[in-house]
Amino acid sequence: MAHTDAELLAMWRDGRRIESIKIFRAERNASLMEAKAAMEHLDNGMPHQYPAMLEGVGAMTLRDHFAGLAMQGEIAGDIQSDLPKEENESWEDALARDMKRRAEWSYAMADAMLEARSK
């Protein structure tokens, strides 16, 4: 069973910081940086910088968050009924192909954002 934010925060404040970070990472699929930042935000009583990492959501990473933002910007007002279709392709198949392309682009953009963020 996953630990709650309150349980992890109690460990953190009890001096078991490394343990709380390790548990946070394992249970919420977070990077070391994300887990440490999450615990510091919880300790400071601040809204969490990575809301998806908080209790109840789980496996969303900062990369997923950035990709979601990129996808949102990419598709905002841009879904068209006249998608470029290949020969004998239905509109639904063209849309599925286009969404896959957009998803791949969104993660490429997220990777670029993380790389720029690390500099």
Image (spheres, grey):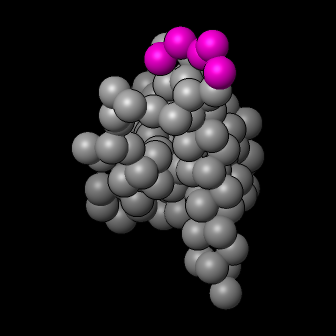
Q: Is residue 113 above or below residue 79?
A: below
**Extreme-front residue of the structure:** 87
Q: Is residue 117 above or below residue 26?
A: below
Residue 8, how many percent across, how many down? Answer: 54, 41
**Extreme-bottom residue of the structure:** 119
Visible residue check, residue 59: no
- Residue visible at 73% across and 36% down? 26
Residue 94, how many percent across, how many down? Answer: 55, 24
Residue 79, located in which quarter of the rendered image? top left
Q: Is residue 79 above or below residue 106?
A: above
- Residue visible at 66% across and 44% down? 104
Most foreground residue, 82 or 112: 82
Screen quadrant of the N terminus: top right
Residue 31, how many percent across, how many down? Answer: 70, 53
> From the viewer's perspective, is 89 left or right of 71?
right
- Residue visible at 73% across and 46% down? 22
- Residue visible at 53% across and 12% down? 90
Visible residue check, residue 54: yes
Most foreground residue, 33 or 43: 33
Most foreground residue, 40 or 81: 81
Residue 6, located in which quarter of the rendered image? top left
Residue 48, how many percent across, how many down? Answer: 37, 54
Q: Is residue 89 magenta?
A: yes
The magenta-colored residue range is 87-91
